[in-house]
């Protein structure tokens, strides 16, 4: 019997195309609406924020989109990433299941996010953009875009949620090392930020507020600055499909095919990245892999949210999209998986979940860290708290297979490592971590503030 643990591809196996799931989507795309007029947005409106090539990808129905050579050259710094069989975790669980993970933590910044940051920086540079604005919560997205902008010689302004700015100084320094400018949001650099600070000078910020600030700066720049988003949008999930395309080849090397593919979901990009190529195999080639999205019980957009039109940001400046949402007025609890605290979910993933093509589960924080520590002590990698949600679900699958005496092939995405999350581990190890269930009443209350668009869209 083979004891192979790492399934590696050569540089020459690096995918040449991203997979665009919209080409095979059995559900029609929903319109994207202007936040003020509530009419479908035109490419002109979007072109204030994004370069045209990314807007075309956003609405494209081409099945495969070629990865530009300069992007592939930078991908080669860390791709193809390894597929690893978690044999020591299997032994600990004493399960007949086979557990594989795709290790996206090997990128220079430690997460999957450079897969789209590099692509977005490339298309902006090609379109003549001078500077990019963006937001960051925990800091992973800002770090990835800072590295990418540096490679393409572009300036970057990062609006970082104020509480993270103060709690995670090392993330800020990481971004500054690549040459980015980092501001604690809400700032006095935007009209929206100033209005919030006038009401409450101690406003701690939120991802929704930081998005609003970054969008405002780009929108008012007269075309010199563009805005970049690290998740949610079709083109972001598109760029992440390199993960799943590589994983398909590597599962083939392992001589197995996954019964279940698992990823954590914040806005949906690392999950979409690993799952969409397997969804294609389900839709086109008769495979029957279960695709499982995992979210925190504190931010249960899929499992407790509502599938409806909502603003992408708190200030109601970003477009309105149809998605599973907790309401744009959502104020997250202070859980440690900062990257999973967004109020909405990628529209494509929302549509597939609504159509029953993917499953979702919510897991609590303490069980998640328990899984993270088991993983660290068996496989040696300290996972990001976000990724630990996927590990929790993978372990639960393996234990379920054991209870049923089934051999099950499990694949999960290790979206990042947790080297900048030691305070989270400290809280867990000292027993200070508490679970939090987002209340259904809060969702019901937030639904009263949804944009009124039904007349237009139904
Ligand atoms: C940002 C982030 C996430 C959540 O974002 P998605 O778009 O849902 O993937 C998950 N894991 C890590 C390590 C992240 O940095």
Image (cartoon, grey):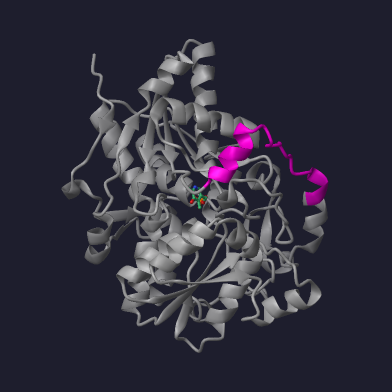
Whether residue 12 sits left or right of residue 387 in the image: it is left
Quarter of the rendering occupied by the N terminus: top left
110 to 433, vertically: above or below: below
Q: Which residues are magenta?
A: 421-442
At a point 33% along the width and 50% down the height, the residue shown is: 242
Question: Which residue is more in the foreground, 278 or 225?
Answer: 225
* Residue 199 x/y as whole percent: 80, 74
261 to 439, vertically: above or below: above
* Residue 353 x/y as whole percent: 57, 44
At a point 52% along the width and 53% down the height, the residue shown is: 348
Question: Which residue is more in the foreground, 60 or 312?
Answer: 312
Question: Which residue is more in the foreground, 433 or 319?
Answer: 433
Name the quadrant containing residue 224.
Answer: bottom left
* Residue 37 x/y as whole percent: 68, 78
At a point 22% along the width and 60% down the height, the residue shown is: 73
Judge whether residue 137 can be spotted in this image: yes
Quarter of the rendering occupied by the C terminus: bottom right
Whether residue 15 sits left or right of residue 39 in the image: it is left
Name the quadrant containing residue 369.
Answer: top right
In reply to whether residue 37 is colored magenta, the answer given is no
Judge whether residue 60 can be spotted in this image: no
380 to 115, vertically: above or below: above
175 to 8, vertically: above or below: below
* Residue 27 x/y as whole percent: 52, 51
Whether residue 115 sits left or right of residue 367 in the image: it is left
């Amino acid at each position: 019997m083979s004891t192979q643990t790492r399934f590696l591809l050569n540089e020459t196996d690096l995918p040449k195309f991203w997979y665009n799931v919209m080409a095979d989507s059995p559900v029609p795309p929903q319109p994207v609406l202007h936040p003020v007029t509530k009419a479908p947005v035109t490419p002109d409106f979007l072109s204030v924020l994004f370069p045209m090539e990314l807007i075309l990808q956003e609405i494209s129905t081409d099945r495969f989109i070629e990865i530009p050579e300069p992007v592939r050259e930078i991908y080669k710094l860390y791709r193809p990433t390894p597929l690893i069989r978690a044999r020591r975790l299997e032994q600990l669980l004493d399960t007949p299941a086979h557990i594989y993970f795709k290790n996206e933590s090997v990128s220079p910044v430690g997460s999957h996010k450079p897969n789209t940051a590099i692509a977005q920086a490339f298309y902006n540079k090609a379109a003549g953009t001078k500077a990019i604005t963006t937001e960051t919560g925990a800091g992973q997205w800002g770090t990835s875009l800072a590295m990418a902008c540096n490679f393409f010689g572009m300036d970057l302004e990062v609006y970082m949620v104020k509480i993270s700015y103060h709690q995670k100084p090392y993330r800020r320094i990481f971004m500054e090392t690549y040459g980015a400018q980092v501001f604690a949001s809400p700032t006095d650099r935007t009209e929206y930020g100033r209005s919030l600070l006038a009401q409450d000078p101690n406003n701690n910020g939120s991802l929704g507020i930081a998005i609003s600030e970054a969008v405002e700066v780009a929108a008012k720049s007269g075309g010199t600055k563009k805005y970049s988003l690290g998740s949610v949008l079709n083109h972001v999930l598109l760029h992440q499909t390199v993960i799943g395309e590589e994983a398909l080849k590597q599962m083939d090397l392992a001589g197995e095919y996954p019964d279940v593919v698992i990823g954590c979901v914040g806005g949906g990009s690392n999950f979409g990245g690993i799952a969409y190529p397997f969804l294609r195999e389900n839709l086109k080639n008769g495979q029957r892999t279960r695709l499982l999205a995992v979210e925190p019980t504190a931010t249960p957009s899929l499992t407790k949210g509502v599938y409806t039109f909502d603003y992408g940001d708190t200030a109601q400046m970003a477009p309105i999209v149809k998605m599973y949402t907790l309401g744009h007025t959502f104020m997250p609890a202070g859980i440690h998986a900062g990257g999973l605290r967004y109020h909405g979910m990628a529209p494509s993933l929302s549509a597939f979940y609504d159509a029953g093509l993917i499953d979702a589960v919510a897991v609590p924080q303490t069980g998640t860290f328990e899984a993270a520590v088991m993983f660290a002590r068996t496989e040696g990698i300290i996972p990001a708290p976000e990724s630990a949600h996927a590990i929790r679900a993978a372990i639960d699958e393996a234990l379920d297979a054991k209870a049923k005496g089934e051999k099950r092939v499990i694949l999960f995405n290790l979206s990042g490592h947790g080297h900048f999350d030691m305070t989270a581990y400290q809280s867990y190890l000292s027993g200070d971590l508490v679970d939090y269930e987002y209340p259904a009443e809060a969702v019901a209350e937030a639904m009263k503030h949804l944009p009124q668009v039904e007349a237009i869209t139904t």
